[in-house]
Image: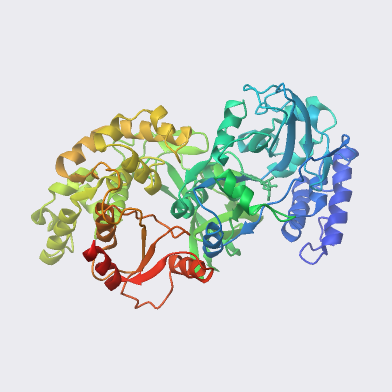
């Protein structure tokens, strides 16, 4: 036994862990006589979850003998999981059509039945998937759950979703419980509905039975219309799934709820039916879990930097530790709220992972340090007053703050792929009054650049040429460069594809945007607001740049009509974009990813890296199964277009 009353959890068997969880759960919830501190109880539950995520004991958290048993009409299955891009790519090959992507909420699953009149009839926990516990009285108290549907259902329906606790709500209970999922699990089984209501649970509806709809996203939209809190969902092409996954992984620290992955589903219900389910999970859905290598290190210092938005951002400086083969010594701590959430102190031993397999992140404190993390009292760059905003701390003078202004230019040069303008160079140019905003780059002269230390003729000429090269830019790239929240690659592409040029983008209303597939209301609002805010910069940039707007899409007409070409690998004869444009001009389609209906996969002739791309693997798998594209090289492609 360790001094805190818990055995070494890494050595305990699953059965032993289950026994301990059962025992301490009863003491806490039934007997009101806990022997363990809340963090220790949580540690115990977490240990069991890590070792046996499917353990039924995890669903028993909360008061025992709660409610009557309820048998599910359709078994409540689990989700199939994947941890890598290749597994995801394989799964995407199994069906046709688009993909619905939503966050994987870390809470407890529940089923809610409504009668044909739309009245909430019965709610139950998942239990063992076949039989759960009646939690109707507590679910009626959750404000995200309508007691009566706002839209008449076609008959009795069953809504499934996740009961969870918002982090902002959890903050009120932090002293009593240290993990929102366990508190949600306990609260939903509270015997007294008033006490359960006091906790402030939330509900995310992700599934409905009894509603006939052609697509998954139609069902989710129906749920929102019927009165459920809308859950974030993006409807994307297969080629965009990975990017949306990464975007969610990046946004994870700023969400008001805990997510442990991303759920993807085939959007077309006919495809869902065709794929069916195993006894464990449906084949049309997949959970891509966040996980990277985990390592432990010590926090030495916290550095505060100011981002382009003026957010004063803490960065953890830790003793170097290897994570998935890369040495990591810095990790963003996102915002002061995250520092508080972790309970971080200097000298603490911390667990780090690479989220989404890439971005180093401090997950938790494994052993506390000895000195508090000091939060700056004024902007570390310009000394202005700081304004707290939720978890964030913002410089109150971003229009003049050196770090924020340089950050905006730095974002622009990175997104526009203008080389040679690192933070140091931008600092020098800023301090000389030469570049205070992105548009200033375009009037920089070699003579001005020569005033910067260590810049000679050669470098000055190169920098001027770099800027000149970037002066002409595609509309989607231009939009991405603006640094507007939520206007990353995917949304920029959608805007460019759906709207007729920059003027149309600038004039678009949030309502029109939210009507476009793949863009939700929240993103629509933040994008339109951001564009309005950045209007002065956009106008200044337009005056000095050439923005290439795609020609309005004509109905596909031409010799390649009905054929689709996917490109992969480094091309030698033409740039990929050029080849795609050519195919489109000839009436063909150029989807991003390979599917059963793809006509050709064109592999670039430069095969110097000797590797097979994921598209090539996907195509070969299809071909082996007797379907899929014809795989050709650049020569064959040239012959086809020459013939056309
Ligand atoms: S779809 C067959 N969507 O994750 C179940 N599930 O680990 C289909 N979950 O039991 C569920 N967020 O409780 C779906 N956006 C989401 C979800 C989600 C969380 C839970 C669900 C499921 C568990 C599987």
Q: Nearer the viewer, residue 354 or 488?
A: 488
Q: Nearer the viewer, residue 25 or 515?
A: 515
Q: In the image, residue 506 lies at what x, y percent?
A: 29, 32
Q: In the image, residue 350 lies at what x, y percent?
A: 61, 58
Residue 74 falls left or right of residue 378: right
Query: Is any atom of residue 37 visible in this view?
Result: yes
The picture quadrant where one finds residue 484 is top left
Q: In the image, residue 531 lies at what x, y percent?
A: 32, 34
Residue 11 falls left or right of residue 243: right
In the rendered view of the protein, which quadrant contains the N terminus?
bottom right
Q: Residue at x 31, y 37 (%)?
A: 499
Query: Is any atom of residue 171 visible in this view?
Result: no
Q: How is the image coloured?
A: rainbow
Is residue 365 shown above or below 31? below
Q: In the image, residue 399 lies at what x, y percent?
A: 30, 35
Residue 365 falls left or right of residue 239: right
The picture quadrant where one finds residue 346 is bottom right
In the rendered view of the protein, which quadrant contains the C terminus?
bottom left
Label total for image: 0
Residue at far left of view: 447
Is residue 460 shown above or below 145? below
Is residue 214 shown above or below 622? above
Is residue 576 shown above or below 634? above
């Amino acid at each position: 036994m360790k001094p805190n009353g818990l055995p070494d959890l890494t050595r305990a068997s699953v059965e032993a862990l289950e026994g301990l969880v059962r025992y301490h759960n009863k003491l806490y919830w039934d007997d009101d006589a806990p022997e363990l501190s809340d963090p220790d109880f949580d540690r115990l539950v977490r240990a069991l979850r890590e070792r046996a995520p499917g353990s039924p004991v995890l669903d028993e958290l909360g008061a025992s003998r709660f409610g009557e048993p309820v048998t599910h009409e359709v078994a409540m299955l689990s989700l199939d999981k994947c941890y890598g891009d290749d597994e995801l790519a394989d799964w995407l090959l199994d069906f046709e059509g688009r993909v619905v992507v939503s966050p994987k909420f870390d809470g407890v699953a529940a089923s809610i039945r409504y009668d044909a009149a739309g009245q909430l009839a019965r709610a139950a926990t998942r239990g063992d998937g076949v039989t759960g516990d009646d939690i109707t009285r507590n679910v009626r108290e959750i404000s995200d759950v309508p007691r009566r549907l706002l839209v008449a259902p076609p008959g009795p329906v069953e809504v499934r979703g996740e009961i969870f606790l918002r982090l902002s709500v959890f903050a009120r209970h932090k002293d009593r419980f240290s993990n929102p999922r366990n508190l949600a699990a306990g609260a939903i089984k509270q015997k007294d509905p008033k006490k359960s209501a006091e906790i402030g649970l939330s509900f995310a509806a992700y599934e409905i039975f009894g509603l006939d709809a052609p697509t998954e996203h139609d069902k989710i939209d129906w749920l929102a219309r019927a009165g459920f809190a809308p859950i974030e969902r993006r409807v994307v092409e297969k080629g965009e799934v990975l990017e949306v996954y990464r975007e969610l992984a990046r946004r994870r620290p700023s969400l008001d709820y805990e997510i442990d992955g991303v759920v993807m589903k085939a959007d077309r219900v006919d495809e869902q039916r065709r794929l069916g389910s195993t006894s464990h999970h449906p084949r049309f859905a997949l959970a891509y879990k966040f996980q990277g290598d985990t390592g432990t290190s010590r926090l030495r210092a916290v550095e505060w930097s100011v981002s382009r938005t003026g957010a004063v951002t803490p960065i953890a400086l830790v003793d170097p530790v290897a994570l998935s083969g890369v040495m990591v010594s810095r990790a963003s701590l996102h915002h002061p709220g995250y520092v508080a959430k972790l309970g971080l102190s200097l000298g603490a031993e911390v667990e780090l992972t690479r989220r989404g397999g890439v971005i180093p992140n401090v997950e938790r404190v494994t052993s506390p340090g000895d000195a508090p993390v000091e939060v700056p009292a004024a902007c570390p760059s310009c000394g202005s007053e700081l304004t707290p905003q939720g978890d964030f701390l913002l410089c109150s003078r971003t229009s003049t703050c050196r770090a924020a202004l340089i950050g905006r230019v730095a974002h622009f040069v990175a997104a526009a792929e203008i080389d040679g303008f690192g933070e140091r160079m931008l600092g020098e140019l800023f301090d000389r009054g030469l570049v205070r905003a992105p548009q200033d780059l375009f009037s920089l002269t070699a003579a001005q650049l020569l005033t910067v230390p260590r810049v000679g003729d050669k470098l000055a000429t190169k920098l001027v040429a770099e800027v000149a090269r970037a002066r002409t830019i595609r509309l989607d790239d231009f939009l991405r460069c603006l640094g507007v929240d939520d206007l990353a690659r995917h949304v920029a592409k959608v805007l460019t594809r759906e709207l007729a040029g920059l003027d149309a983008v600038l004039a678009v209303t949030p309502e029109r945007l939210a009507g476009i597939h793949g863009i939700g209301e929240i993103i629509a609002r933040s994008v339109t607001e951001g564009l309005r805010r950045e209007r002065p910069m956009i106008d200044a940039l337009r005056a000095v740049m050439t923005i290439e707007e795609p020609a309005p899409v004509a109905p596909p007409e031409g010799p390649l009509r009905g054929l689709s070409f996917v490109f992969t690998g480094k091309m030698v004869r033409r740039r990929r974009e050029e080849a795609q444009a050519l195919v489109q001009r000839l009436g063909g389609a150029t989807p991003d990813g390979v599917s059963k209906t793809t006509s050709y996969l064109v592999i670039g002739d430069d095969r110097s890296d000797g590797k097979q791309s994921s598209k090539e693997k996907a195509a070969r798998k299809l071909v082996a199964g007797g379907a899929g594209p014809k795989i050709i090289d650049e020569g064959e492609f040239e012959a086809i277009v020459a013939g056309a």
